[in-house]
Image (cartoon, rainbow, N blue to C red):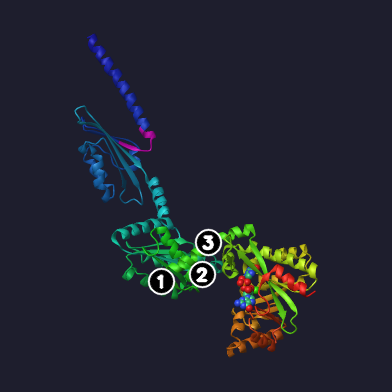
Amino acid sequence: MNELHYQIDLLKAMNAKLTAKESMYNLICSSLSDAFIYYSFEKDEYTTLGKWSDLFDFEINDSRDFETLFESVEDSYILPLRDTLYAEKRNESSASVDCRIKDSVNKWVNFSVKITYNDDLTPHEKIIIISDITKNKIQNDELSYLAYFDSLTNLYNRNYFVRVLGSFIDKAKAKGDVVSVMVIDIDDFKRINDGLGIVIGDELIQQLGDFIKDFTNDNVIACHLSSDIFAMAMYDPVDERSVDYLEKCISQRTKRSFNLSGGQEIQITVSIGVAEFPEAAESALELINCAEIVMYKSKSMGKNTIQYFNTPLINEFIASVEIENKLREAVFSHSFELFYQPQYSSVNHRLRGAEALIRWKDDKGTSIPPSTFIPIAEKNGNIIPIGKWVIEESIRKYMEWKEAYDYDFVLSINISAMQYKRDEFVADLIDVINKYHMNPAYLELEITESILIDDYHKVMEKLKRLRDYGIRVSLDDFGTGFSSLSYLKKFPIDTVKIDKSFVDTVLNDSATRIITESIINMSKALGFETVAEGVEQEEQYKYLNAIGVDNIQGFLFGKPMPASEFSDILKGLM
Ligand code: C2E
Ligand code: CA
Ligand code: CA
C-alpha cells in the first residue's frame, strides 16, 4: 500500500514539475516573435505555440491541416515548403525556406525545421519555427535594387553595368564575338540644368533613360553612367542591336522635343562615342573609358555627332593627359618663361607695345607650345595659377624696364575666359598693379569674343571697372568668332586685334580684302585702335598700312623673344 502511495506521490510531483516546465515553455514561446509547431512522431500529435495566431488564422491539429498551410503560400513556394516541412523523409535534421504569403501585398515568412532522431534513426520530434521576415526581405530587396540600379532612371548603375559588360566580354572572348560600347552624352546639359533647374534636368534624363531602356534585352544593356551620360553595351552588335541602328533611333528621338512638366518643351542633341571589344580594349572599364574619351572628342568636334574609336585619337588623348600631369608639376615649379613680341606703329614704326607670350619647357627640355597647353590648362583649372603668374611676372618685368629705360609702351597680357570670370579677377589685378606701382594706362588685357558672350551684365560690370581704373582692353583674334563690329559697339574696349588668318590671305583673296577694309573702317568709326597680327611679309605690311591699320605685330618686325632680347630693343631706343 505504502509502495502505491509513494508511486502516486511521485507521479503527482512529476506532473506538477511537468506543468511548471510546460508553462515555462509556453511563456518563452509567447515572448518570442516567432510561431512554432511541435510534433511528436510517437504520439502523432501537433501543438502550435508562440505567435501562431499573429501569422495564421487556422490551427494545426493533424497532418491534414498542413494542406491549409501549403495553400497559404504562393503557388511557386508550395513544393519547396512541402520538402522542407517533411525533411525527415530525406533523413535530414534541419531545413529552411522563405515563402511569400499568398494574397498579401508583400508578406514573407521563413519556415525552419529541426528534427531529432531516436537511436534506431527513426524520427523522434520535429519543431517548425515560423518567422515573419517581411522587413528583412524588403530591406534586402531595396539593397539589392540599390546595388544594381540607378534610382533616377531605373537603368543599371555604373557598377552593375561594368559587371554585366564584363560577362559580355568573357563570353565574346570565348566565342570570338564583338561587344560594342556606346557612351551617350547630352549636349549643353549644363545650360538646361542651370536655365530650367535640376528638377527639369532630372526629368529630361529620366525621359531619355526611359527611351534607351526600351532597347535593352539579354544582349543589350544600358546604364546611367553619371549626370547626363548614358552608356549602352551590345553583345554581337548586329541588326537591331547595332551601333548604327541604335544611333539612328536615338537621333530620331532627339529630333522630337521632350515634353517636361510645366509645359516645357526641350529639344536636345547628343554626342556619342563608340568603342568595341576586342579592337579598343580587353576589359569592361577600359572599354567604357575609350568610349568616353571618344565621346568627348565628338563633343569637341562640334557636338551632335558620333565618333568611333581609333588609335591616333587615343594617342592624342594620352599625350594630352601626359601634358596635363606635367603641367601640374610645372605650376608648382614655375618652369614657365615669358617671351615678348613687339608691336610697332605702322605709321612711324615707333615701338607701340609688347605682347607677353608664355613659354614652357617640360622636364625633358622639350618646348610645348601655348596653343597645346593653354587649352589643357583652361580645362583643368591650371590656367588660374598660370595666369596669375603671367600677370605678376610681366608687370614686374615691365616696371624693371621702366626703371632702366624709362620708355612708355603698352604691355599686352592674354587673359583666359576662366580667369576673367573669377569674381576676384579685377581686384587681384589692381593689387598687382599697385604692388609694382605701374601706370594702368599702359596695361592692356587681351580678351577674346568668347568672354563677351557670357553673362552680359557680369562681363560689362568688370569691363567698366577695368576701364574706370584706366586699364586698356583689347579684343584678340578678331574675325575668328561670330561677333560683328556693330555688336562690339556695346562693349567699352580700346583695341581690336585683326586675326592672323586675315593677314595670311589678304594679298590673294579679294573677299578677305573687302572684309579687312571694312573692319578697319568701322573700328576707326567706333574709335578703336587696330593691331594686325601675324604680319610676315613686307607686302602684307604695305597693304595694311595703306588701308589704315594703326599697329603691326608679326615676325616681319619681331618674333616673340626672351625678356633679355627685348631689353636690347629698349636699350637701343635710349
Ligand atoms: P595669340 O594671343 O593670338 O598670340 C599670337 C600668337 O601668334 C603667338 O603664338 C605668336 O607667337 C604668334 N605670332 C605672332 N606673329 C606671328 C607671325 O608673324 N607669324 C606666325 N606664324 N605667328 C605669329 P604663341 O606664342 O604660340 O601663342 C599662341 C596662343 O597661346 C596665343 O595666341 C594665346 O592665345 C595663347 N597664349 C600665349 N601666352 C598666353 C598667356 O600668357 N595666357 C593665356 N591665357 N594665353 C596665352
Ligand atoms: Ca593675344
Ligand atoms: Ca591673337
Residue 3 percent across, percent down from the top left: 23, 10
Q: Is residue 470 left or right of residue 282?
A: right
Q: Earlier in the sequence, mark 1 or mark 3?
A: 1
What residue is pinned by disc 1? 250
Say which of marks 1 and 2 sits in front. Answer: 1
What residue is pinned by disc 2? 262
The residue drawn where x is 38% and y is 55% is 163
Say if disc 3 is inside 8 Å of ligand 1.
no
Crowd class of label 3 (few under 14; some 14 to 19; many from 20; radius 10 Å): few
Q: Is residue 192 left or right of residue 76?
A: right
Residues in magenta, as a range:
29-36
Residue 365 percent across, percent down from the top left: 59, 62
Crowd class of label 2 (few under 14; some 14 to 19; many from 20; radius 10 Å): few
The part of the image, by quadrant, that contains residue 244 is bottom left
Label 2 is placed on what type of residue? Gly
Q: Earlier in the sequence, mark 2 or mark 3?
A: 2
Element type at mark 1: helix
The answer to which of 422 and 479 lies nearer the viewer is 479
Say which of marks 2 and 3 sits in front. Answer: 3
Residue 302 percent across, percent down from the top left: 50, 74
Label 3 is placed on what type of residue? Glu
What residue is pinned by disc 3? 322
